[in-house]
């Protein structure tokens, strides 16, 4: 069975504009609206296997895009730095050097 | 004539992993190493027109990826906020509210 993971949700979010309309529809129903494979098959009047194959292929494409563009990975890196920055800034002992380093690190990420 | 623009350089930087090896080679020689079309044609033993067509098609692909993924646009948005944040933080009148708003804005960008 396919696993409805958070990772796929993120990858779908980052790369959906590169998918075909059909791929987007299936993925959206399956991952966002929590339809079953059978329900999607019925909706589109195709076999359950066809839906399964399409979704599996799409997941492979998403991982392939991620291995090339790293958008999810870079997003996580940025979020981590921003959280540190907020923590550093909002706890009272303001460490100017640490904060400047964090801002520089953020600036250098593309 | 092709124009060797900063924009294409940025787009190439963001999306080169999605291009073919040949596309990357031509683009890299033309935009990064400042070869002429004629020099690339000679290097690869193809016509100048073939190099020109390949580079033009590649530029169209890069713009197409940018219209879908907006990586360059988002990069510029982030850089702008980071510059404001640095300015705000390093000029002495610390405006906590403005700084927190900038950090929140950064966090919300994907």
Image (spheres, coloured by chain):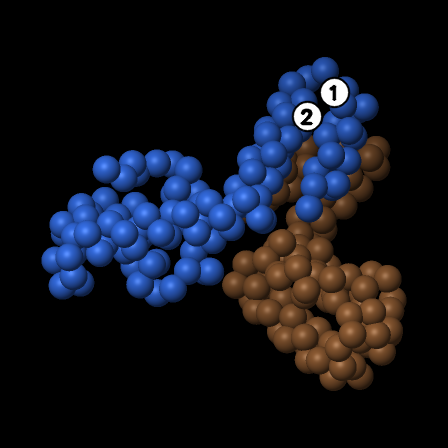
Chain colours: A brown, B blue
Q: Indicate the quadrant where residue B98 lies.
A: top right
Cβ–Cβ below 8 Å for labels 1 and 2?
A: yes
Q: Residue at x 68, y 33 (%)?
A: A96
Q: Indicate the quadrant where residue A51 lies.
A: bottom right
Residue at the extreme top of the image, as rendered: B93
Is A20 on the left-hand or right-hand side of B50? right
Q: Which chain's residue wears label 1? A: B
Say if residue B43 shows up in the picture: no
Name the spot of residue A85 as percent of width and height, x first.
73, 41
The kind of secondary structure element at disc 2 is helix
Is A85 on the left-hand or right-hand side of B12? right
Name the spot of residue A91 as percent of width and height, x first.
84, 37
Which of the two labelled residues, at mark 1 and mark 2, occupies the earlier sequence position? Answer: 2
Q: Which mark is residue B89?
A: 2
Q: Which mark is residue B94?
A: 1
Q: Indicate the quadrant where residue B95 lies.
A: top right
Q: Is residue A21 above or below residue B35?
A: below
Q: Which mark is residue A81?
A: none
Q: Are marks 1 and 2 on the same chain?
A: yes
Front residue of B70 and B85? B70
């Amino acid at each position: 069975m396919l696993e409805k993971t958070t990772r796929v949700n993120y990858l779908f979010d980052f790369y959906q504009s590169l998918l075909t309309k059909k791929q987007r529809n299936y993925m959206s129903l399956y991952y966002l609206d929590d339809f079953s494979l059978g329900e999607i098959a019925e909706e589109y009047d195709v076999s359950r296997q066809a839906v399964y194959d399409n979704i599996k292929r799409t997941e492979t494409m998403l991982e392939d895009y991620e291995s090339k563009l790293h958008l999810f990975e870079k997003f996580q890196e940025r979020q981590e730095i921003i959280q540190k920055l907020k923590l550093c800034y909002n706890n009272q002992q303001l460490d100017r050097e640490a904060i400047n380093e964090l801002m520089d690190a953020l600036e250098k990420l593309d």
